[in-house]
Each structure stands twice: as C-alpha cells, then as structure tokens.
Amino acid sequence: TLLGVVPNLWFFGVLWRCEMAATGLLLLEHFNLNVASTKLAESFFVQGLKCCKDPFRAAKIKSMHVDVGPKCQFHTAGPEFEAYIAEEGSQIWRGSLTVVYKDDSDFNSAVQSCRELAKAPDFAASKLSVGPDQRGLPVAITCPFGNSFLLRVASLEERDGLGPES
C-alpha cells in the first residue's frame, strides 16, 4: 500500500498486488485521474472523502486539484477541459486507493458523507456505492466513476510514525 501523510486524512495510495502491502510505505504526491464529471469528482473528493480543493489553482488550469494534506493531491481532468475524455470516459485504476484517517471521528465523518452522497440525486446514475461498516475494518467505496477506495483509520504505528509535519 502506498501511504502518505496529511493532517486529518492521512493519505491514499494504490494497492497493486497483495504482496506489496508488506513492503513498506511510499509517498504518492500527485495522482492524475480523468473523470467523466468534474462536478461529481469535486463533490466526492471534497464532501465525501473530506479532501480540500486547492484554492491556489488558477481557473484556467485544465484539471481540478484536490489536496490530501500538505504534500499530496488528486488531479482530476474532466470533459469540460479535455474533449477526448468525453469519448474515452473515466480512467479506472487497477487495485484500490486507500485513504487513511487519523482517528475514528474523521473516518466516520467521511464514511457518513459518502453514504449521504450516494443517496443524492446527482449521484443516482453514477457508480458511487459504500460497503458495510464493520468495526475495525476498512470500508470499501466505489467512486462515482468506478474506482475502488478503501477507507480506514490509521494504526497506532502509523499515527506515531507519521506526524502532520512530515
């Protein structure tokens, strides 16, 4: 699993193969993803996952940048900026993106927000779904475009080893 640091959300990463989970931690600073709708992407990443839209990005930039703490970002380009995306559709990554929250409160808030978004009319035709919440286990979420996310709380070792200044 690739893992990085953020103040409230600790980070996200891609789990490519099961055996990678035991190999250590890496920082993934920018994750580029083409999406079918920048509006749905913004709602999912900001309202659902509790990321922060980068306030310093110029309006003329051809992608939305969403901060996951001080060092990591999702960059999402939609068809309103890149015409080929309308024809090709959203990018679907193999594996899962893991979002690690600092504590139960932040984790529960994100899971609940994603559940509420999944019921919203704007997401009715999307692929957004939220798996069951089983205490102590990650919650599986499929984003509006079909990418797999796992949300979980940081382990004590992760919390102790990674600080907000990292």
Image (tube, grey):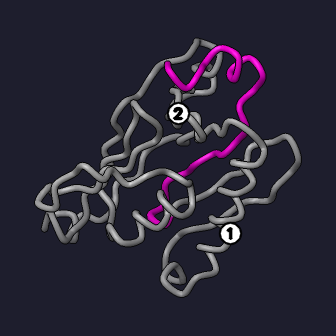
The residue that appears at 68% across and 21% down in the rendered structure is 158
The residue that appears at 29% across and 65% down in the rendered structure is 89
Question: Which is nearer the eye, 109 or 79?
Answer: 109
The residue that appears at 65% across and 56% down in the rendered structure is 110
Residue 163 figure quarter:
top right
Question: Which is nearer the eye, 151 or 50?
Answer: 50
**Which kind of residue does numbered mark 2 sit on?**
Val
Residue 97 position (above or below residue 45): above
Q: Is residue 98 magenta?
A: no
Q: Is residue 156 magenta?
A: yes
Q: Which residue is disc 1 drawn over?
A: 115
Residue 25 position (above or below residue 37): above
Image spot of residue 160 (x, y percent): 70, 17
Count the labels in the image: 2
CA distance separating discs 2 and 1: 23 Å
Q: First in sequence: mark 2 or mark 1?
A: 2
Rendered image: mark on residue 6: 2
**Which kind of residue does numbered mark 1 sit on?**
Arg
Image spot of residue 98 (x, y percent): 58, 39
Residue 74 position (above or below residue 118): above
**Label 1: which secondary element:** helix
Task: Give the residues in magenta.
Answer: 144-166
Residue 116 figure quarter:
bottom right
Q: Quadrant of the N terminus?
A: top right
Judged left or right of residue 108, residue 5 is left
Q: Residues within 10 Å of mark 1 (few under 14, many from 20)?
A: some
Q: Nearer the viewer, mark 2 or mark 1?
A: 2
